[in-house]
């Protein structure tokens, strides 16, 4: 079997396991006694069919409370491939992706989504593997007033939907420097703010430090009509402290727009965001692009193998994890898709009360230890036999 003949783990389980065994496997794998499939409107399904993308729906429930009403929110996670060859003119490439994702957002609106989030650097190929500055830097645009934010602002207002989108940012006011940035647009259509990627990879073909530095926006949480939202961009998911700080700042849903490839990170993918949801008592939404991207010039990976022109395959597999440790099945590994998930945000507090992770977190202890570890004369606390 080739790497992408297996389209989706959940579909494979359903194909090959008897019903009773399948139910127990899903309980162990996904943490739910009964699969909580969400029935989606026919109009959303039809839009997906007409535009050739996958659409799936699930829900997480919380206990009914006496003093709080349910806080039901629907989120949409969008994964997609690029639309045109990387040799096409920049504006045509961007517009081609826009047109593809506009249809997915339309389906999200039909499915009742209150919040949608794109994958990392969604308006462009993930060209940072090439280490070439041109023409790829031309994809960069302003966060607040750039063409993509303006376009999405209209959709956010029209659909009464918060839209989070990840771009290559051009910071006009500070030397026209470039950042990897997520932009948050209110359901009123107004720009709320942005967050820049905190951790930059230096592994494999992810040569992003050639283009931008680590972000300088801290760990902001954006308070919206539909909950307190944060964005942990791509490589930041490998850093538990990054996830932790969004939790300390009050996040209820943390999105993880990503672009990552098969053999490098797929064994980590289903674990990290789920662990973060458990440890921090919030929902997590990891999103990954799909497809293999072909570039005009050969580049090397610094691993002794021959130069090549392809980057990928990006394996999709977007999912949502809940603070109680349960999670949805993933979207496919190779297809454009929309994952619609209904959440009750009351589950965040309920899990805090049950497990007590936040109560037992002992932040002062670790603050003291981190301070010591950050000093130039730090010595590890190791006790040896004498």
Image: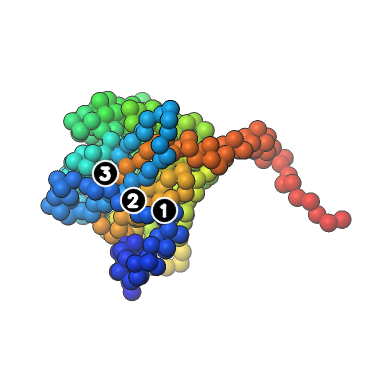
Q: Residue 123 bears which disc, if any?
A: 3
Q: Position of residue 300 (x, y in %)?
A: 39, 61
Question: Residue at the location (42% across, 68% down)?
Answer: 305
Q: Position of residue 322 (x, y in %)?
A: 43, 45
**Front-most of 34 and 153?**
34
Q: Position of residue 333 (x, y in %)?
A: 32, 59
Q: Position of residue 135 (x, y in %)?
A: 27, 46
Determine whether label 1 and label 3 are within 8 Å by CB.
no
The answer to which quarter of the image holds residue 170 is top left
Q: Residue 36 bears which disc, if any?
A: 2
Question: Residue at the location (24% across, 51% down)?
Answer: 55
Determine the CA span between mark 3 and mark 2.
Answer: 32 Å
Q: Which residue is mark 1?
A: 32
Determine the CA span between mark 1 and mark 2.
Answer: 8 Å
- Callout count: 3
Of tags 1 and 3, the one toward the viewer is 1
Query: In the rendered image, is residue 264 in sight?
Result: no
Q: Callout 3: helix, strand or loop?
A: loop
Question: Residue at the location (20% across, 33% down)?
Answer: 159
């Amino acid at each position: 079997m080739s790497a992408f003949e297996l389209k989706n783990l959940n579909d494979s389980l359903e194909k090959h396991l008897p019903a009773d065994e399948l139910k127990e496997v899903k309980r162990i794998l996904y943490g739910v006694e009964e699969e909580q499939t969400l029935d989606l409107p026919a109009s959303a399904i039809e839009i997906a069919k007409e535009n050739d993308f996958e659409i799936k729906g699930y829900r997480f429930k919380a206990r009914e409370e006496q003093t709080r009403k349910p806080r039901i929110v629907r989120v949409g996670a969008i994964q997609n491939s690029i639309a045109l060859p990387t040799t096409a003119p920049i504006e045509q490439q961007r517009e081609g992706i826009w047109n593809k994702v506009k249809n997915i957002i339309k389906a999200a609106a039909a499915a009742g989504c209150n919040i949608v989030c794109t994958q990392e650097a969604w308006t462009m190929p993930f060209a940072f593997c090439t280490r070439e500055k041109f023409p790829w830097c031309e994809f960069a645009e302003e966060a607040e007033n750039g063409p993509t934010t303006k376009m999405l602002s209209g959709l956010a207002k029209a659909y009464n939907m918060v839209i989070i989108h990840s771009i290559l940012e051009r910071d006009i006011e500070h030397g026209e420097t470039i950042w990897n940035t997520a932009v948050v647009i209110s359901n009123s259509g107004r720009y709320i703010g942005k967050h820049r990627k905190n951790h930059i990879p230096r592994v494999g073909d992810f040569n992003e430090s050639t283009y931008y530095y680590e972000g300088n926006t801290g760990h902001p949480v954006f308070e919206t009509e539909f909950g307190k939202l944060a964005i942990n961009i791509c490589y930041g998911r490998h850093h538990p402290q990054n996830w932790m700080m969004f939790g300390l700042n009050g996040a209820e849903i943390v999105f993880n727009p990503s672009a990552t490839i098969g053999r490098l990170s797929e064994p980590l993918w289903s674990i990290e965001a789920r662990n973060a949801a458990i440890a921090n008592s919030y929902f997590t939404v990891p999103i990954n692009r799909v497809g293999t991207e072909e570039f005009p010039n050969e580049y090397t990976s610094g691993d002794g193998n021959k130069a090549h022109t392809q980057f990928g395959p990006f394996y999709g597999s977007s999912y949502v994890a809940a603070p109680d440790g349960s999670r949805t099945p993933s979207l496919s590994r190779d297809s454009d898709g929309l994952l619609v998930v209904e959440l009750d945000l009351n589950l965040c507090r309920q899990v805090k009360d049950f497990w007590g992770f936040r109560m037992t977190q002992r932040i002062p202890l670790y603050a003291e230890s981190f301070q010591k570890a950050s000093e130039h004369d730090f010595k590890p606390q190791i006790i040896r036999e004498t």
